[in-house]
Structures are given as C-alpha cells and as structure tokens.
Image (cartoon, rainbow, N blue to C red):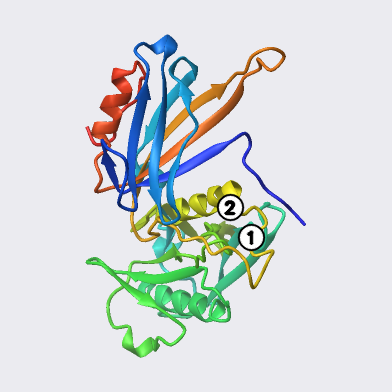
Amino acid sequence: MATFSVNQNRQLFVAKNVVTTTPVAVGDLNLKIVGEDILHSYMYFQHMGYGGLTRSDKIDLSNVMYAKTTKAGALSRKLKNATVTLDSEVNGGNPISGQDYVLRIFFRQYIGNSDIYQEAKYGVVHGYKGMTASDFYKTLALSLAMNFSKEVVPLLKFYLKTSSGSTEVTASTVKKDLTDTYTGVVIEEAEQPWRLGVRRQEEVFFDVIPTTVLFNSEEVIWGTVENGTSETIIKNGKKMADLEYFCMGERGDQYRQIGWPHNLETKYLVDPEKEYNVLDIHYYFSDSGVNVQKSEKDITILFEKSVSMTELVTALKKLGITVEDPNA
C-alpha cells in the first residue's frame, strides 16, 4: 500500500470573498495582523468553511521566505494534436499503388506513471491505382477510428482536415458520407475522465510515426507529422479540486473512509468546472532552545478567477512581503 503526505506542511484555503472582518459566509477569508513592526508582528488568516471558522498558523512576518502568485492559465493546458500528411517528396504527395502505408501511434505511460509502460496502435492504408490523396486520408482516418473503437476509455479523436475546417471520424462514420476534399488527418488527444479522490485527470502521451514504403527502389518514410495543440483547454479546476481533497485529508482525515459507514464526509469548496488563481506563502517556524531549526511550511489560497486578489496582495505588500498580483 502506498501512502502519501505533504512534504513539509501545507494549509489550503479556498477564498470566495476577501473580507476585513471576521468571516461569516462560507468562503470568506480575512487577513489578521497583530503588532506594530515587522520584527515584532505576526499575521494569520481566518477562513469560513463548511465545517465552521478556522484559522491558519500565526506567522512571524520576519519568517516569511517568499510569496508568489500563479495565474489560472499557467495551470491549464491545451490538448495535444498531430496532423499527418503525405510527404510531397514521395511520389509528389500521391499514394503509390500496391504499397501498404502503416501509421504507428506510440503511447507512453499507457497503464502507469513510467515510460516503461508502452503500447502501440496502428492505422493502415493499401494504395491502389487512381487513389487520390483525399481518398488516402479518408481510408486512414477510418482505419484509425476502427482500430481504437474497442478502447474502454477513448484515448484519441480523429479528424479529416479540409481547407475550411475539419470533420470528426468515428467507428460509426460511413465512408460514402465523406464527400469533401481532404488534405490531412488530425489526431487529437481525448480529454480523460476524472473523479475526485479516485482518479486524477491524466495526460495522454503519444507520438505519431509514419513507417516506410518502397519508392524508386528505396524505402522512404511516406508521411510528415506536424505536432501542435488544439483549441480545447483543460482548465485547472479539477487539478485544484484534487489539491483541496489531498490537503483536507492531511488536515483531519488522512486514512479516508477508514471508519465506513461512520466515516467523515468532507464538503469541499473548489468547483472543478471553474478556474482558480493561486497565492502561495512560504514561511518557517523556529522555536527556542534546542528547537531553533527552521520548519518550513506553506499556505496556499485559491481564488476563483472572478474574485480579485488585489486587496489581499496590497495588504501583504504593505507588510514588506513581495508578491505579484495576477489581476493587476
């Protein structure tokens, strides 16, 4: 059994609103400052969650090592795609009659978190006399769609590229319905399933590799691959929900559901469909006597993208803490 915990110590709060008085509504966050100067002052946060009012550590201002913000966009990503076309240097970019064209799609981290877990799947086209490049792309896309149709969780999506857009191809697509002139096959990463506390949303790591055909008595690679990203963006909401789940467990329910059916049912504040800006404050606690070592800790505050961090960041700057505001 693998067990995981925070590296040092991380307290996480989700701020729906920054207030200047004691928090009352769920999601309210308040910064409290005690003392008159940085050498003899401390601060702490009060936060209202579904379980009631809580507070962070009391932090000596002189013990703050750094603070940083991270924009929601920096924690989001676009889905990967790859566009396959016939190489114009091979038979003028036209299919060669009698040749078998094999496209290999190579997956890394297929069933685990290491590149040793590998899998390869294929699309195949047999060239025939009079076959056009458009016919080639239709056959290739349909072959790929059929060969991936038995995957329990879809890994990739397939599109036929046209001069004005693209058409998705699935295992149920009928070839005679594909009537446009196609200029390539687009292979796009499929968004993976996610379930809080059970299954994090994984990235699909894949490489598209055309193999060889015989042209002018030589074996040559028949296609070119242009790697890029799609317009589909995976927002950071699910990632932040995972972090909240983990930190809340660390706070008071490390073993999860161990007392089932009398286990704790935590109610969370992160909405996985939204985006969150992040404020991290890194500090340390140092005691007296023989316990003067630095025990480093973190406070992470998540702000819905619609909630301004300006007021809180301004207050921290007045305390001598350097921090950037993503909403500035």
Q: Which of marks 1 and 2 is nearer the N terminus?
A: 2
Residue 81's image quarter? bottom left
**Relative to 10, 32 lies left or right:** left
119 w.r.t. 75: above or below: below
Q: Nearer the viewer, residue 106 or 316?
A: 316
Say which of 269 and 230 sits in front: 269
Q: Do the residues labelled 1 and 2 touch (CB within 8 Å)?
A: yes
**What is the x, y in percent for residue 164?**
22, 66
Q: Quadrant of residue 158?
A: bottom left
Label 1 sits on a secondary structure element that is loop
Mark 2 crowdedness (10 Å alpha carbons): few <14, some 14-19, many ≥20: some
Q: Residue 119 at what x, y percent from top left?
A: 66, 64
Q: Does residue 163 show up?
A: yes
Going 43% across and 87% down the picture, which residue do you hit? 172
Task: Locate the N terminus by quadrant.
Answer: bottom right
User: Vertical placement of 21 versus 290: above or below?
Assistant: below
Who is closer to the viewer here, 21 or 136? 21
Picture coordinates of residue 19 (x, y %)?
26, 39
Q: Residue at x 70, y 58 (%)?
A: 117
Name the disc covering residue 256, or none.
1
> Residue 145 versus residue 175: which sits nearer the camera?
145
Q: Quadrant of residue 230?
A: bottom left
Residue wearing tag 2: 249
State the mark number for residue 72: none
For the point 58% across and 71% down, which residue is it?
Answer: 122
- At a point 32% along the width and 83% down the height, the residue shown is 178
Q: Can residue 100 be seen in this view?
A: no
Vertical placement of residue 264 versus 298, above or below: below
Q: Where is residue 287 in the image (x, y as percent from the top left)?
A: 62, 18
